[in-house]
Amino acid sequence: MKRRELFGLGGVVLLASCGSAGKPRPVEPGELLAVAVSDGLTVVESGTGRRIVAPAATLATADRRRLVSTVAESGTSRVVTRDARTGDLVTQTTVRGAGRLAAVAPDAGLVALVDGDPDGRLETTIIVAGPAGSGTG
């Protein structure tokens, strides 16, 4: 999957790609594009424009094969890992606390969630979660 950034403003979409200093190569039909939108990160199939994964406040693994997101649910956070190519659910676990996703391991085996205001706080609880649950530090 190639990484491309798309920013939408009304009906206008600006495409910016990272690549060589020369002319960027055209996107091939059927390529999957990681797209940052106002709702978070999504994956779009370039040939059809179909969203493979619904937008969410998401982090991708270093190899872009997995997308990890959290859903706050009454004092807990559900950590959801999806396959970036298909959107299929790979794993999910529920952890105590309503943390926001801060980091993901390269293989998505562990994630770090933090609480508090990202703009300023005196202390931060870090929740490290894997498939079996969580611990705090």
Image: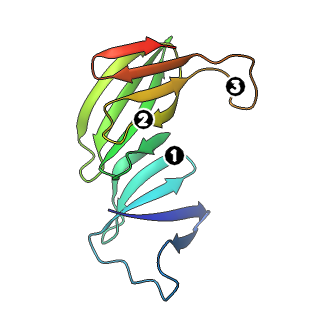
Q: Residue at x 47, y 81 (%)?
A: 20
Q: Work out whether 3 lies above or below 22.
A: above
Q: Any mark on residue 40, and which?
A: 1
Q: Which image quarter is the N terminus in?
A: bottom left
Q: Callout 2, which amino acid? A: Ser
Image coordinates for residue 6, horizontal then vertical, percent: 52, 64
Where, by quadrant of the figure, is residue 71 drawn? top left
- Left/right placement of residue 52 relative to residue 123 reads left
In terms of sequence position, does the residue under pointer 3 or pointer 1 come before the other?
A: 1
Residue located beneath label 2 in the image: 69
Image coordinates for residue 4, horizontal then vertical, percent: 46, 66
Q: Residues within 10 Å of mark 3 (few under 14, many from 20)?
A: few
**Secondary element at tag 1:** strand
Label 2 with label 1: CB-CB less than 8 Å = yes
Q: Residue furthest bottom?
A: 23
Residue 56 seen: no
